[in-house]
Image (tube, rainbow, N blue to C red):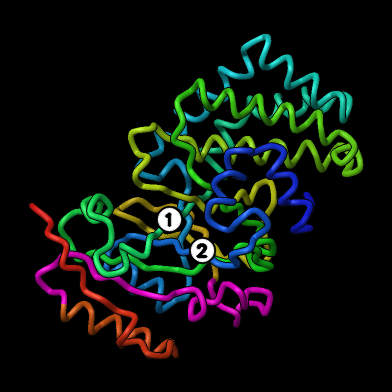
Amino acid sequence: MTNDPTQLRKLQEIFLPYYTERRKLLFGNDFEKPLARFVHYTSADTAIKIIRTKRLWMRNALCMADYREVKHGHAILSSFFKDPLKGGRFCTAIDGCIPGGAQQILNQFDQATNLITSGTYITSLSEHDDTENDIGRLSMWRAFGSDARVALVFDIPAISKGSVALNLMFSPVCYLPEADVHASLMQAVGNIDKERSFLQSLGQQTVVVYAHTLLLAAVTCLKHPGFHEEREWRAIHLPNLNASKIMDSSLETVAGVPQLVYKIPLDAKRDPVLSDLDLSRLLTQVVVGPTDYGPAVGASFVAELSQLGVPNADKRVVLSDIPLRA
C-alpha cells in the first residue's frame, strides 16, 4: 500500500467522497488550515495515563461499546454490493481500471466481518468548537458515568508524517441513512471512472489493497444518524493488512476483559518521525468535567502537564461549570 501522502489523499478523495467533504470543512480545500481542534472525552484516570505514557489506546472493534454500529455499517455496504445495478456499476468501474480487481475486492469484503472482529483497532475523537473551550459538551460528559471525567483537546495536523508512518487512517464517522450512503458510494463509482488513468498507474495490488482498506474504514465509521451530535472521527489501524514497526501493542485488561491493545505513541522519543504527533505539541487544553472534586482533579493535571514539560500548564487546565443532572 502506498505511503505517499499525496497519493493517499487522492485515493481518499476517489473512494471516500464523504470523508473529503468533512475534511475540507475542517482543514480547507487545499489544507489552508494546517491544524484542526479535536477532543477525546474519557475518565480522569485514563486521561492521566495517556499523559504519563504519551500513548493513546486503540481497542479492537469487537470490544468497543458500540460494536453493533460496526455491524450496522457492514450491513449497509453489503446491501449496496448485492444490488445488481449499484454493485454492477462498481465492478464495471473497478474492472475498467484493473481487470479482475472488482472480484478481488468483493472477495476480501466478504471476509471483512472476521477481519473486523480480529484485526481492526479504533480510538475516537470528536470535533471541538471554541465555544466548548470552557465547558465541554454536555452529551459527551453524560457518556462517561458519574466518575471524574476529562476532555483532552488536541490540535491535529492536516498532514502528518507520523500518522503515515504509523499506518493510521483518520476518518470522520458517517451518520447518513442507508440511501445517502449508497448515493455516496455511487459518487465514488463516478470518481473511479474519472480517475482511471491515475488508478492504472498505481498497479492492481495497490488499488485492490487500498480500496479494500477504505471499505473497511467505511464499515467502522458508519453510525446511526441519531448519534450525529457526537461529530466523531476515528483513528483506525489494521495491523493484519498494514502493520507499523513503530506502533506499540500489549495485552491489557479493560473493565475486566483481557484484550490486545494498540497504543499510538504520541512521543518523538519513540521515533523522530513522530515529532508532529508528540503529545506536548498536540495537547492544548484539559477540560475537567463536572465533579465534586474539580479543584483537586485540575491540580493533578497541572502537575502532570508540568512534568511533561508543557509550558503554562496552569493556563491549559480549566474546570467546566456545566450543570449535569444525575
Looking at the rendered structure, which numbered label has been put on residue 250? none
Asked if residue 284 is among those painted magenta in the image, a careful observer would answer yes
Query: Which residue is more in the foreground, 137 or 259?
Result: 137
> What is the x, y in percent for residue 174?
48, 38
Asked if residue 136 is among those painted magenta in the image, a careful observer would answer no
Query: Which residue is more in the foreground, 208 or 249?
Result: 208
Q: Which amino acid does label 1 sit on?
A: Glu
Q: Name the residue under label 2.
A: 36
Q: How crowded is mark 2: few (under 14 residues within 10 Å), some or many (20 or more)?
A: some
Res. 102 image quadrant: top right
Query: How many circles with numbers are drawn on the protein?
Result: 2
> What is the x, y in percent for residue 136?
28, 62
Residue at 67 percent across and 41 percent down: it is 213
Query: Which residue is more in the foreground, 136 or 27?
Result: 27
| Cα distance between the residues tagged 2 and 1 | 8 Å
> What is the x, y in percent for residue 309?
44, 90
Q: What stretch is highlighted in magenta?
A: 266-294
In the displayed structure, 87 sits above or below 20; it is above
Q: Which amino acid does label 2 sit on?
A: Ala
Q: Mark 1 points at which residue?
A: 127
Left or right: 28 with respect to 197?
A: left
